[in-house]
Amino acid sequence: MFEKISYEDAQSASNQLFQCASNLLNAVNGPLQGRTEVLDLDYSRANVISTDYDTDLESAWSNLNLFSDGSDFSSATIEKNRNLYYQKQLAN
């Protein structure tokens, strides 16, 4: 296969793959570090009720202690921290 692809094309493809990986890391870590805004779509997807919510009681989604801020169980705090939780899961 190396005979069919020029060195310049392979180098260009690898550079684009590395740029894509870098963009992905920035997109995931930016909100976690407080450097970028959270997209509305990401926020809404993190807080929609999952399809297996009724059957999977061990799901992290149903454990509000993971998303509360001490004794603050308000819906705004839960939604914000749930979004951060899933971003941290993606980053790891």
Image: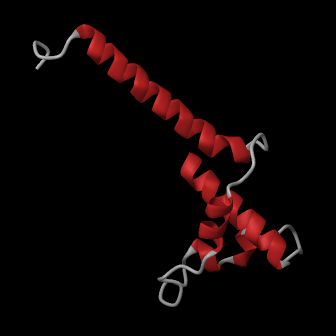
Q: Can residue 92 be seen here?
A: no
Residue 23: image location, x then y, percent: 55, 35
Q: Quadrant of the N terminus?
A: top left
User: How far across and down, in percent of the image, does residue 22 sit?
Assistant: 53, 31
Is residue 49 among the parts visible in the rendering?
yes
Q: Nearer the viewer, residue 64 or 34?
A: 34
69 w.r.t. 5: above or below:
below
Q: Measuring 47% from the left and 83% from the top, which residue is drawn there?
A: 52
Judge by depth and name the residue closer to the eye, 79 or 54: 79
What residue is shown at x 17% (from left), y 16% (from top)? 5
Q: Residue furthest bottom?
A: 54
Is 41 displayed left or right of 70 in the figure?
A: left
Give the farthest residue toward the top.
7
Q: Quadrant of residue 35?
A: top right
The residue nearer to you, when weighing 21 against 91, is: 21
Q: Position of residue 6 (x, y in %)?
A: 20, 11
Residue 65's spot in the image, x, y percent? 74, 74
What colouring does the structure picture have? secondary structure
- The quadrant in which residue 9 appears is top left
In screen coordinates, is 38 left or right of 49?
right
User: Quick check: 59 above or below 27?
Assistant: below
Identify the residue at horizontal 84%, vertical 78% (top origin): 73
Q: Tell me if 32 is positioned left or right of 46 in this view.
A: right
As drawn, 90 above or below 49: above
Q: Quadrant of residue 16?
A: top left
Number of numbered discs visible in the structure rendering: 0
